[in-house]
Image (cartoon, grey):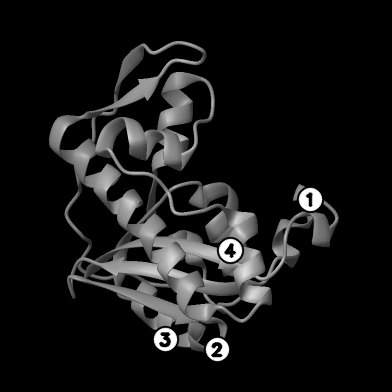
Amino acid sequence: MDKLVIDIETKNSFEDVGGRDGLKNLDVSVVGVYSYKEDRYISFDEHELQALGELMQKSHLIVTFAGVRFDIPVLAKYFPWNINAIKHFDILEEVESRLGRRIGLGILAEANLGVGKTGHGLEAIELYRQGEMDKLKSYCLNDVKITKDLYELIKKQGYLWIPERYTSQMTKLMLPYTEEEPPQNQLF
């Protein structure tokens, strides 16, 4: 079975759907994926979501950053099977449960990988609206790469560095993680 790192971008914003309560009314524009089995980055347009679903159903683990609160609930409406049946490792959820607060992907990337994000979600919506699909896919896949690299770092060293607010100090946040063997059969 495969293991996937996933990030989504949407066509619309929370403002367009009446706030965070309208999360399920957001529409996918692009999904970026890293497939461990295929060792490659793949992007899926909105009309290719069936192929994404087929790939996901052959996976035993989905890795995301903020996927529990955003990516997975938005994607769920596109599939007739239970997307939540796939085991999920959400870096933001792990960090927040131990740290007691949220922290952005870009901040974690800069502190731990020495790289930053190439934009933010609202810019991605604007790229979609302008028809800049190649730029949108590149932005999304960059976030997938950052998420994958942070995941690999957590597996390797068991911690991430967290910048302290308003100071130049860093906190070593322990994130012990042991990857489980994939199940032989997964039913949806």
Q: Which residue is mark 4?
A: 124
> Distance of mark 3 from mark 4, alpha carbons?
22 Å
Sooner in the amino-acid sequence: mark 4 or mark 1: 1
Bin the neighbour count of mark 3 within 10 Å (Cα to Cα): few under 14, some 14-19, many 20 and up. Answer: few
- Whole-percent x, y for residue 146 in the image: 33, 50
Question: Judging from the image, what secondary structure is the residue with disc 2 in?
Answer: helix
Q: Which residue is tagged 1?
A: 21
Quadrant of the drawing holding the C terminus: bottom left
Mark earlier in primary sequence (2, 1)? 1
Q: Secondary structure at mark 4?
A: helix
Say what amino acid the circle numbered 1 marks: Asp
Q: Is residue 161 above or below residue 51?
A: above
As rendered, which of 147 and 56 lies closer to the eye?
147
Left or right placement of residue 185 versus residue 129 in this view: left
Q: Residue at x 54, y 24 (%)?
A: 101
Measured Cα–Cα span from mark 4 to mark 2: 18 Å
What is the three-letter code of the residue carrying label 2? His
**Vertical relation: 109 (above or below) 1:** above
* Secondary structure found at label 1: helix
> At 75% from the left edge and 55% from the top edge, which residue is drawn?
14
Name the residue that disc number 2 marks. Answer: 47
**Element class at badge 3:** helix
* Earlier sequence position, callout 3 versus callout 1: 1
Residue under pointer 3: 51
Q: Measured from the top left, where is residue 94 in percent x and y?
A: 41, 34
Give the mark toward the camera: 4 or 1: 4
Q: CA distance from mark 4 to mark 1?
A: 21 Å
Where is 138 relative to 92, above or below? below
